[in-house]
Each structure stands twice: as C-alpha cells, then as structure tokens.
Image (cartoon, rainbow, N blue to C red):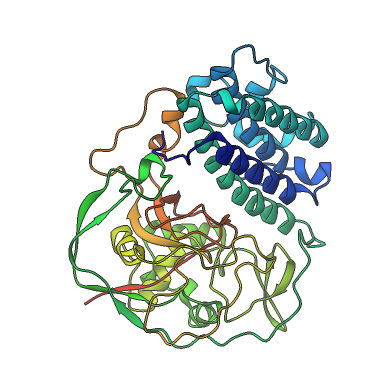
Amino acid sequence: MAKIWIQPGQDALAERYRAVRALTQALATPLSDADATVQSMPDASPAKWHLAHVSWFFETFVLRDHVEGYRPFDDRFAYLFNSYYEAEGPRHARPMRGMLTRPSLNEVRAYRAHVDAALLAAMPHLPEAACTLVALGLQHEQQHQELLLTDLQHLFSLNPIAPALFDAPRAMPAPVPGPLHWIEGREGLVEIGDDGKAGFAFDCEGPRHKAFLRPHALAHRPITNGEWISFIEDGGYRDPALWLSDGWAWVQAEGIEAPLYWQRSEKGWTRFGLDGRQPVNPAAPACHISLYEADAYASWAGARLPTEAEWESAALNIAPTSGEQLDGAACPRPRAAEDGTSLTQMFGDVWEWTGSAYRPYPGFRTAPGAVGEYNGKFMSGQFVLKGGSCATPRGHVRASYRNFFHPHQRWQFTGLRLAKDL
C-alpha cells in the first residue's frame, strides 16, 4: 500500500483523475485495433490490455469495494484484466494477453468511459480510504502510461516496415556533450527513503532510514551513445573479463552486440524509437541497455555503477523537472554541453541502473489485502533504477522513487551514470 497525501477537497482529486485518464487516452489515439491487440513478448502487454487493466484497478478496489450498488461493466473482465493480484483470484495468463482479440479496442474504450462516469459521480461521497486508493490508482496508471509506450515501441520494432508511433521532430543541430566530470558525493551517514513530506510515495520507498556512504563521486551526466559506440568498437561485447558471469552467458546465448533496437549499416548505427528508425545520435544518452551491459561498460571505463543510496543522496535537492517526459518522439534527446560543475539529467532522460538489489528497506511491511501485493512481492532477483525517463509522465518521479527490473531486461528507457570510489 502507498503512503499518500491528498490535496484538500475532492475537486482537486477529480481534476487530477480527469487529467491522468485523458493522457492515457491521448497516447492510445493513433492505434488501430490490431496495434492495440498484439503482444510482442511475454514481458510486454498489448496496449488494449493496459487500457483495460488500469480501469479494472479503479473498478475493483474503489467502485466495487466502496460504492454501494455499483454493478461491474462486464463480470468477465475481472478474469481478463487482473494482473498479478492473487487475492483477486485466477486470471488470464500473462504470456497469452495478445490472444485477446475480444473485447475490441472500442469496447475497452467504452469500459474506460463507464468506469470514469461511475467514479467521478461517486467521488464527492467517497470515504478517505477510497480516496487513498484513487490516488494510488492514478500513480499506477502513470506507470502504465510509460509501459504503454515502451511496449508499443518493442512491438513496432518487430515490424519490417519500422512504423513510427509519432512523427519524427524536425532535424536540429545536435549539441556536443562536454567531457565527463566527477562530482563528489556525500559521505558518512545519510538518510534516504520517503520522509512523508513529498506527497505521494509507494510503500517500497520507505521507511526513511540511515545509510553509510564511503567517499565516492558520480559522473555529472549519463553516458552518451557516442561513448557507447567507443565501447563497442573497443571490443566491449567480446571481452569476457568485463562481464558478470550471468551477463556473459546472456551475451553469448542471445548474440548481443549493441543496445536493443540498434542496427549497424554501411552509413553507421541506427536505432528504432517511437519516431521510427533513425540514425543514432552520438550526443543523446545511451539507453535500452541491461544491467549486465551497464556493469560491463562501467568495468571497461574503470568505474562502477552507483549504489541506490549514493544516487538518491545526490538527487535529494534536485527538482525532478528536467527531461522530455512525453514531450516528444525523439526519446531521449541530446542535451547541450554543461560545464560539469554539477549533476545534470538526473531526472526525466533515462532510468539509471544502480548496483543495488531491489530489497526491502529496514522496517518495511507489506499492507494487508490485495493492494499489499503491489510492490513487496517482487523484491527478489531485481535491481533498482532511479530518475525516470523521457517516457515517464511529469510529476511521477522523485529522488526516493524505486523502479526495478531484472538484470537482462532492456526494453525500457534504461541507461547509466558512472560512479567511482575516492
């Protein structure tokens, strides 16, 4: 369950509800029924499923449980659109979501409209517990807004005609990033985790606790595509000495030789993005890399990945307002050169891998009931990423936010920032 703070009055919550739900609809506007139905891999979900699942969340945990007399839009949807909530009973298998040719995209949109009308009508009369769930559901939907884009990007990348979800922006001169600089981090005892003052926080972000940091420094910006090309050309994907054992086995088994979506041609490297296939911009942050790749690059560069505590302590006083965050199709975009005297691009460009396992903080307890399954049950075998990406909605990230994925996964906008010991 999440710890949240809700603005006074139901009007603010209703306004936020309308805005978040409208953005999801807008992101799905270009899609055909076929676009929204196909599933490209077990880790991804069809767009249609995302649209329905976030509505199922509101229907189940708010309307069903807190609005007397509410009748579900379709009783069968509880089986189709539950994700992983064991307490809510059996559900359609995740790898088979792409087989749901019915209901149609238009029926799913009708489902969303039904849930919206019912919830907004009930909003003035909802108890505080239900309002807490609405706020949680909106954060949950923002997570799915990013997943909607990353899953569509993966789907479209498998189409030989390389369709673009959004038009490519007008070509502009690429800024040339400056050399990498090192910014000393805090050392000794620091406090990390949610302190209850930021507004919303997921349960896994707390409790706030102390961590001890040894002398270290962080790179002032993420690694760029140009720097990653140097790693490739120096044989980074062919040198087992750089790789974790599991990572080297993955590289060999999967034939990995570049970030996901990259292709080599006579004219150089290209990448596939939400704007279709385009030349790799050497000044843009490197992304779509796994933890294994990030760790190998760090070894090649004579550095390491930052710990979660190092990254978060460095970001505490940085406002999470930078980056594109759904503003454009070229994702992520290059940034102008900085003087290297401060940390840049901490938020809203690429999720940055840390070397920290996704495990509970001291004193963490899962909440009772189905909503308690939201985060705690996944604290095994995954690593923490920080900072948000160009596909993360504005207002959704903060220094304490803990994203997490398995070390081989890279279809998200995942990149890296180096760290080193001092």
Q: Is residue 294 left or right of residue 77?
A: left
Q: Is residue 224 above or below residue 315?
A: below
The quarter of the image holding the C terminus is bottom left
The quarter of the image holding the N terminus is top left
Report the residue that reaches farthest toward the left: 188
Q: Nearer the viewer, residue 258 or 199?
A: 199
Q: Is residue 240 left or right of residue 281?
A: left
Q: Nearer the viewer, residue 265 or 339?
A: 339
Where does residue 25 sit, x and y in percent of width and height?
A: 73, 45
Give the residue at x 66% y 53%: 149
Report the residue that reaches farthest toward the top: 69
Q: Quadrant of residue 294?
A: bottom left
Give the residue at x 72% y 21%: 73
Give the residue at x 65% y 30%: 120
Q: Is residue 215 left or right of residue 46?
A: left
Where does residue 109 sit, x and y in percent of width and height?
A: 77, 35
Where does residue 274 sit, x and y in percent of width and height?
A: 70, 62
The answer to whether residue 42 shows anywhere in this view is no
Please tell me how many numbered marks the rendered image carries.
Answer: 0
Q: Nearer the viewer, residue 299 or 379?
A: 379
Q: Is residue 251 above or below residue 267?
A: above
Where does residue 116 sit, x and y in percent of width and height?
A: 69, 32
The answer to whether residue 230 shows anywhere in this view is yes
Q: Is residue 156 above or below residue 5?
A: below
